[in-house]
Image (spheres, rainbow, N blue to C red):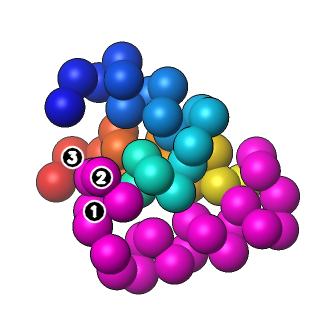
Amino acid sequence: MNKVIMILLSIFLPPIAVLIKEGVGKHLIINIILVILGVLPGVVHALWVNMRDK
């Protein structure tokens, strides 16, 4: 998927961005917990997941 779209999704809907990139797994669970604790940690985690090389 286009990187610009993934960055925008990471900012506005972090769990959806992680779900698209990684699927259902540990990163999605971690991101949902981080979003519940505070939106900024969830955004940072989503950006990290989507921008890292895999």
* Quadrant of the snapshot with the N terminus: top left
Q: Is residue 44 visible?
A: no
State the residue position of label 1: 22
- Disc 1 crowd, CA 10 A, few/some/many (<14, 14-19, 20+): some
Q: Are marks 3 and 1 in contact (CB under 8 Å)?
A: no
- Residue at the spot 37% in from the left edge and 32% down from the top edge: 6
Identify whether 50 is placed above or below 7: below
**Residue at horizontal 27%, vertical 52%?**
21
Q: Is residue 23 left or right of residue 45?
A: left
Residue 37 falls within the magenta-colored stretch = yes
Residue 22 at least partly seen: yes
In the image: residue 16, left or right of residue 20: right
User: What is the quadrant of residue 36 in the picture?
Assistant: bottom right
User: At label 1, which amino acid type do we have?
Assistant: Glu
**Spatial distance from mark 2 to mark 3, Cα to Cα?**
15 Å
21 shown above or below 31:
above
Q: Where does label 3 land, which residue? A: 53
Quadrant, the C terminus = bottom left
Distance between mark 1 and mark 2 Cα atoms: 6 Å
Pointers 2 and 3 in contact (C-beta within 8 Å): no
Residue located at (36% from left, 60% from top): 19
SS at circle 3: loop
Residue that mark 2 sits on: 20
Q: Which residues are magenta?
A: 19-40
Q: Given the image, on which type of amino acid does mark 3 rest?
A: Asp
Residue 29 percent coordinates (x, y): 51, 78
